Amino acid sequence: LNYRLTGDFKTPFRIFPAIEETAPKTIEISVLVRAEMPENHFGANVTVELPLPKCTAAASCSLVTSPGTTGAHAEYSAQDKKVVWTMKKLPGNSEQTVRIKVTLTQPCTSMIRREIGPISMNFEIPMYNVSNLQIKYLRIAENMPGYTPYRWVRYVTQSSSYVCRL
């Protein structure tokens, strides 16, 4: 069963970006991701992508991880001009931060700042349901030979288009 939720709902993750110009050709970007789901759930295979300006010469990433997070890694792809931050497991009610120091080939202007972002995020949350839609009763209408149904329902919340504009 697949469905799309378009009304008001509480998002499982919130993204808080901050951009600071530390020197004429250097900017520092800080991205905080907060998991706003209950502690007994976690985000799996979380990927955060942040496009950087075309005039980026170099970028270095440092992570501030909280307990329970596994497989956190951030790296700058010079070919794609973006930072890719991955986390294998991000527990509920926790925060993660990546700090990116970007060196530019020319002084930072408002046009260059507009080239930063948007931040996109992909994730899965096993056994969690944002809409609280629950299956109470399931009946299989036709009996197919060779098919044995299992007696459980697996809930998975997946992102398809989760974007934070800067």
Image (cartoon, rainbow, N blue to C red):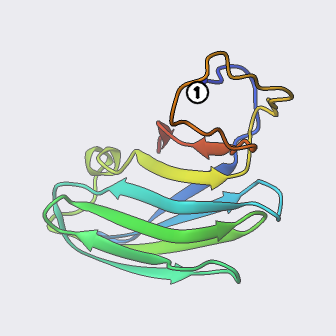
Q: Is residue 125 above or below residue 144?
A: below
Residue 162 horizontal/vertical position (percent) = 51, 40
For the question of whether residue 25 can be seen, the reply is no
Residue highlighted by disc 1: 2
Report the side of 118 relative to 115 (left or right): right
Which is nearer the eye, 119 or 1?
A: 1
> How many marks do you count on the picture?
1
- The kind of residue on which mark 1 rests is Asn
Report the side of 98 relative to 108 (left or right): right
Residue in the image at 44% along x and 49% along y: 119
Residue in the image at 65% along x and 38% along y: 149
Query: Within 10 angstroms of label 1, few (less than 14), some, or many (20 or more) residues?
Result: few
Residue 69 horizontal/vertical position (percent) = 63, 77
Q: Is residue 42 above or below residue 66?
A: above
Which is nearer the eye, 44 or 134?
A: 134
Which is nearer the eye, 150 or 162?
A: 150
Residue 151 horizontal/vertical position (percent) = 75, 43
Q: Quadrant of the N terminus?
A: top right
Residue 123 horizontal/vertical position (percent) = 53, 52
Q: Secondary structure at mark 1?
A: loop
Report the side of 53 relative to 71 (left or right): left
Residue 33 appears in which quarter of the rendering?
bottom right
Residue in the image at 51% along x and 36% along y: 146
Report the side of 39 relative to 69 (left or right): right
Residue at the top extreme of this rendering: 141
